[in-house]
Amino acid sequence: MLKIKNLHASVEDKEILKGINLEINAGEVHAIMGPNGSGKSTLASVIAGKEEYEQTEGEIIFENEEISELEADERAHKGLFLSFQYPVEIPGVSVTNFMKTAINETRKAQGLEDMPAKDMLKKIREKSELLDMDRKFLSRSLNEGFSGGEKKRNEIFQMAMLEPKLSILDETDSGLDIDALKIVSNGVNKLRTKDNAVLVITHYQRLLDYIVPDYVHVLLNGKIVKSGGKELAYKLEEQGYDWIKEEMKAL
Amino acid sequence: MELKDKLISSFFAFEEQVDVNSEVHNIRSEAMKNFEVSGFPSRKDEDWKYTSLKSILKEDYSIFPKKEDAIEYKDVKKYFIHDIDAYTVVFIDGIYSSHLSQTTHDKIDACLMSSALTKDKYKPVIEKYFNKIAPKNSLNSLNTAFSREGAFINIPKNTVADKPIQILNFSTGNESALMLQPRNLVVVGENAHVQIIERHQSLTDNAVLTNAVTEIYADKRAMVDYYKIQNDHANASLIDNTYVEQQGESNCSVHTFSFGGKLTRNNLQFFQKGEHIDSTMKGVTIIEDKQHVDHNTLVHHIEPNCESHQDYKGIYDDKSVGVFNGKVLVEKEAQKTNAFQSNNNILVSDKATINSKPQLEIFADDVACSHGCTIGQLDEDAMFYLKSRGIPAKEARALLMYAFANNVLSSVKIPELQKRVNKLIANKLNVSLGFDL
């Protein structure tokens, strides 16, 4: 589904990603772990198409198409979704109106008519129940005054509404208490099928107890330096990243 | 003939045909003399530095419409906030239209300036308030000289107006160019409440110049909410002069929604003549092409313990020009004043202009005054967030502008009006939004 080859990216001429290779297939859950400043969030943003990041080398192939030149909205239309670490507050636009606009713009890009209001309402109801969201929440301004947990739950609600092929969850566990973490993870798990995939980006292993990865990759200094199964996450949680750094020095 | 000369000669003809008591006649003559001396303001006046009337004064305006014209309700229905029960006072080319209006004298007066100026029973109110609040500058004087018609609203002590009052001024375009001088007087007694919606609307592309004066008097603990919708044709210009005098513990707000017209100048001034007064001015301006909107505001803090809030937002596209000149004057006696002012602008095109000039003159030492002004583009992080959800750049931009403008609406107290303005903003920005859950 996603093939990243030798990806290099810079922000303001500072190289952050220094040759990433990654392949994700339908039905899989991958986790990328790494210390602060290793380039995790940059990787998420570059895949999603943030303009401030300049892709200087390499390829991003999504569903057999090179998407490096596509705008963020065009990537979204193809089925990419990024759950933000820090969702942006947009006062004056309700969650519902935002979703309506996002879904209908995506449908327009796919040559479909607007979703009938009745279907939209039904879908909103279903998906908000999945995430145990209060109806009142939906008429509030997008992310404005939301708690950390509410923001993350709202991100996963959007994911549920948009039904992407690949979801990138950037530090979705940060700012969540254990109950919110369970609701959010449960939501993500229920949305999983054999046809979609999830890329979890996280600092801590905690989230991976709930969203269990098939593969874990370690990102250090802009490169994936180690890949393994979910046991790698436990080892990182126990021993930190120093042993990997030592291993790398030894090489 | 220059417009000024034409106005002066028309005045004498006008004075002969209106039958008024001598007091108002004296006020008019005095005002005409004043206008004769001062003439129209020019860019040499500090307050008119960024707005020139020159191009709109060139038209050969008719000072009085040649004939009365009736319009059908169905043709103008969309300009009414028709989903609310309201009193309406409607003028067509400056002349009262009884068939489109629903006036009242039951408990409150929502009726005509022409009757207020001529009928004996209103004489005490006219003597006390007419032309007492508006400063005697040239444009106000010009309006006063020709003041004959407009809305007269009188809410007695301890009375809450049972429904909002709409004032609509239509121009038909029967004249190739028409000048209008509506004059409104709003007197709100102690503990009385009223909500007013005002709109100027031309029905064709013919040139119209409206020089309107509204005087609002709010007695102790009165509450007045005044909403102005300015969304006119490309050849319609409006100089709106609104003056609010407030007594102790009163609460007045004026919201101005400027979405179109050739040139719009809003002179809005609040005079706080008691303690614990709250004054609010809010505005949303969204314009394009070569449109020009100028907000010139003043809050005069005269007594202690009062508040004022100003929040103006503007979105300027193409070659449009915006001006915000907001003055807060805090007198020495006005201790414990809280005065806030903010003016935020987005320039959509690099040919659009905004001139923002906050002026704070503070003579008291124990006050909290703040002002902020921003001119900018849209937040890049927010743009990326929306785009990552599949919303293309153009729509994302429109949605963010909508959000930027829309949050001024939260203080609009009439839900139907809030909805209407919301829709106007969404249409203006080409954003399709809004289904209620």
Image (cartoon, helix red, strand yellow):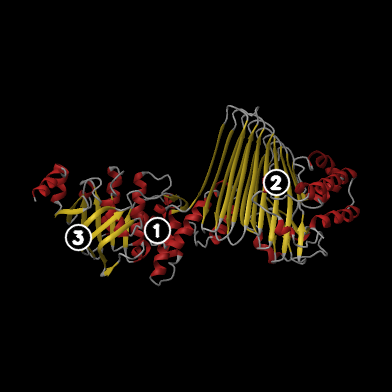
Q: Which residue is mark 3?
A: A21
Q: Position of residue B378 (x, y in %)?
A: 46, 53
Q: Could you tell me which chain the residue with mark 2 belongs to?
A: B
Please state which of the two labelled residues, at mark 1 or mark 3, is closer to the viewer. 3
Q: Amino acid at mark 2?
A: Asp
User: Tag 3's secondary structure?
Assistant: strand
Can residue B256 be seen in the rendering of this structure?
A: yes
Instruction: From the top left corner, tell me how far across and down residue B331 is, in percent.
Output: 65, 31
Which of labels 2 and 3 is toward the front?
Answer: 2
Asked whether residue B108 appears in the rendered view, the answer is no
Q: Are marks 1 and 3 on the same chain?
A: yes
Which residue is more in the foreground, A139 or B58? B58
Label 1 or label 3, whichever comes before in sequence order = 3
Q: Nearer the viewer, residue B322 or B407?
A: B322
Query: What residue is shown at x 47% (from left), y 53% (from top)?
Result: B377
On the same chain: label 2 and label 3? no
Tell me the SS state at disc 2: loop
Residue hosting label 1: A124
Q: Which numbered dot is residue B45?
A: 2
Q: Amino acid at mark 1?
A: Ile
Tell me: B215 left or right of B281.
right
The quadrant holding residue B335 is top right
Q: Position of residue A161 (x, y in %)?
A: 36, 60
Q: Crowding at label 2, few (<14), some or many (≥20) Cα neighbours within 10 Å?
A: few
